[in-house]
């Protein structure tokens, strides 16, 4: 990438407009376990930030608890804004937004969640968010996409459970973030975005390992996404892939048999931050099931790359299992260092940067 | 409940158990199973009460001696719920005093897990948490 796009690229803007709109729950049985979230990561020097606007049917939990389902215009939908930041220490909150306190109209790329909001205006994402608690996170960010988005539909998770996914792995972000009185000013910092939707229950027979990587240097061309879908016991991998962008373009996709993935050791982190905090009572462990290193070796058609990710810090987002009422699902969010090297179409690939990986356990 | 004390926390506990039974009946049933035949002597601040388990219900009643005793402050409960104080550290540093035979304490721990699993699945619990914070503010002023 010779230079970052300071202005929105019309082709990128058009594709985002055509693909990144809210779907919302379809009618019928699939709608009862429908989930959708818009996910943003900032990987700035000295700050890792996660902003997630999430909508979930609560019928899975209702069916456990016996609560009659809301049959109104927005059946059972519940919104959440998850804010999580690491700037040498973890901070975060989950803002609950019951039906009536959030809007995210289907077909549009705009949302209001209590004091937080997301808009896509003139080719840029505008984020405004305000958390709660002692180390509250708040901020205003403008994100300019740098690459063409990619779509992946109906990825198998488990029986009658699937997920669709829009990937936009590279943006630049400017604005400010405040964390418990500490202010971070951001100018053209690296960022990532994806949008997910599908019908599944937390606790269904699946586990994913997913991560993104961005270069430290703005003049480096490469950005990437790795994903691996397995059953909950992680004995059987359903699919795996490594997506590579070069500059604006989606350049290479290694899939399934072209990948060899190795998890080594256990991450040596001295503190595992947990969200929401009340659920730490049920998951007080200080260790986490996150590897000390994940290595991906990909090869095919004469191309070969080698990627490693080493977590530096881990936080856990704890979610009540929707298939049974005595278990949690743990989303381990790991931020760390990422390296990529190899050869694609005869061109040497070398990247050193940062990554965020998510391990469901 | 101790009639000389403000009934607020005892009433709140009773209301939360009713919510649990209504909105997370599976968790409530497991909690009853774990607590059946057992009693807890609970002191929160200046308020002392008992929690008794029966096969299908849990009752909050007047204070009386029981094999398991728990003593803490509202501020400690809020700090645990707010993620500022891990429950392990609260016990270690005597912010949460727990006394009793180890087998009874393990039963209490299982019942607490049932209660929290139910609480996070019950739509009415956020309002109960707000009431808990209000009780604390009434006692100490704004947090």
Image (spheres, coloured by chain):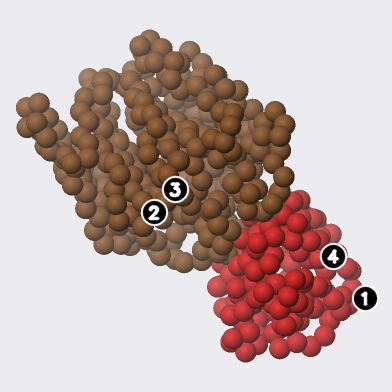
Chain colours: A brown, B red
Mark 2 in CB contact with mark 3 (< 8 angstroms): no
- The residue at 66%/34% (across/down) is A75
Identify the residue under disc 2. A232
Q: Please, what secondary structure does the residue beneath circle 1 have?
A: loop
Do the dots labelled 2 and 3 sit on one chain?
yes
Q: Please, what secondary structure does the residue beneath circle 4 have?
A: helix
Q: Is residue A114 visible?
A: no
Mark 4 in CB contact with mark 2 (< 8 angstroms): no
Identify the residue under disc 3. A86
Residue B3: assigned label? 1
> Residue A17: x and y, percent?
45, 16
Do the dots labelled 2 and 1 sit on one chain?
no
Callout 1 crowding tier (Cα within 10 Å): few <14, some 14–19, many ≥20: few
Do the dots labelled 1 and 4 sit on one chain?
yes
Q: Is residue B66 above or below residue A81?
A: below
| Mark found first going from the N terminus, 2 or 3 | 3
Q: Between A334 and A162, which is closer to the camera in this rendering?
A: A162
Do the dots labelled 3 and 1 sit on one chain?
no
Callout 2 crowding tier (Cα within 10 Å): few <14, some 14–19, many ≥20: some
Callout 3 crowding tier (Cα within 10 Å): few <14, some 14–19, many ≥20: many
Mark 1 in CB contact with mark 4 (< 8 angstroms): no
- How far apart marks 2 and 3 lie (CA) works out to 28 Å
Check the picture and name the quadrant holding the C terminus of chain A. bottom left
- Chain letter of disc 2? A
- The residue at 33%/55% (across/down) is A234
- How far apart marks 1 and 4 lie (CA) works out to 12 Å
């Amino acid at each position: 990438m010779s230079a970052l796009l300071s202005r929105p690229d019309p082709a990128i803007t058009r594709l985002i407009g055509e693909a990144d709109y809210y779907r919302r729950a379809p009618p019928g049985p699939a709608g009862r376990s429908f989930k959708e979230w818009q996910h943003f990561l900032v990987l700035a020097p000295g700050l890792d930030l996660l902003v997630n606007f999430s909508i979930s049917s609560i019928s899975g939990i209702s069916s456990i608890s016996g609560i009659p389902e809301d049959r109104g215009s927005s059946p059972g939908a519940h919104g959440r804004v998850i804010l999580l930041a690491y700037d040498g220490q973890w901070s975060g909150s989950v803002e609950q937004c019951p039906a009536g306190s959030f809007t995210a109209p289907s077909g549009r790329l705009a949302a209001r969640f209590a004091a937080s909001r997301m808009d896509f205006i003139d080719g840029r994402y505008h984020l405004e968010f305000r958390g709660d608690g002692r180390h509250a996170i708040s901020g205003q960010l403008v994100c300019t996409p740098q690459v063409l988005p990619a779509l992946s539909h109906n990825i198998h998770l488990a029986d009658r459970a699937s997920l669709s996914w829009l990937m936009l792995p590279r943006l630049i972000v400017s604005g400010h973030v405040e964390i418990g009185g500490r202010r971070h000013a951001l100018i053209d910092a690296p960022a990532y975005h994806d949008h997910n939707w599908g019908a599944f229950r937390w606790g269904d027979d699946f586990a994913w390992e997913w991560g993104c990587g961005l270069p430290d240097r703005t003049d480096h061309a490469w950005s990437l996404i790795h994903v691996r879908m397995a059953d909950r016991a992680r004995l059987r991998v359903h699919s795996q892939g490594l997506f590579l962008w070069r500059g604006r373009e989606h350049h290479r996709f290694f899939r399934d048999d072209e990948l060899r993935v190795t998890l080594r050791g256990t991450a040596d982190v001295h503190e595992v931050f947990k969200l929401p905090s009340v659920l730490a009572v049920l998951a007080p462990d200080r260790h986490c099931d996150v590897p000390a290193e994940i290595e991906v070796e990909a090869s095919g058609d004469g191309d070969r790359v080698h990627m490693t990710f080493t977590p530096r810090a881990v936080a856990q987002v704890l979610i009540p299992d929707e298939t049974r009422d005595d278990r949690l699902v743990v989303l381990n969010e790991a931020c760390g260092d990422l390296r990529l090297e190899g050869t694609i179409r005869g061109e040497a690939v070398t990247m050193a940067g940062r990554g965020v990986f998510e391990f469901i356990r | 409940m101790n009639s000389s004390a403000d009934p607020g926390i005892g009433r709140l506990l009773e209301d939360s158990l009713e919510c649990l039974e209504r909105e997370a009946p599976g968790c409530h049933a497991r909690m009853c199973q774990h607590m059946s035949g057992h009693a807890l002597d609970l002191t929160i601040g200046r308020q002392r009460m008992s929690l008794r388990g029966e096969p299908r219900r849990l009752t909050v009643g007047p204070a009386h001696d029981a094999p398991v005793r728990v003593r803490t402050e509202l501020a400690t409960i809020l700090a645990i719920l707010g993620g500022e104080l891990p429950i392990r550290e609260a016990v270690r540093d005597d912010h949460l005093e727990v006394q009793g035979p180890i087998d009874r304490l393990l039963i209490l721990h299982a019942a607490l897990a049932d209660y929290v699993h139910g609480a996070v699945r019950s739509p009415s619990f956020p309002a109960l948490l707000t009431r808990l914070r209000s009780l604390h503010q009434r006692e100490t002023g704004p947090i």
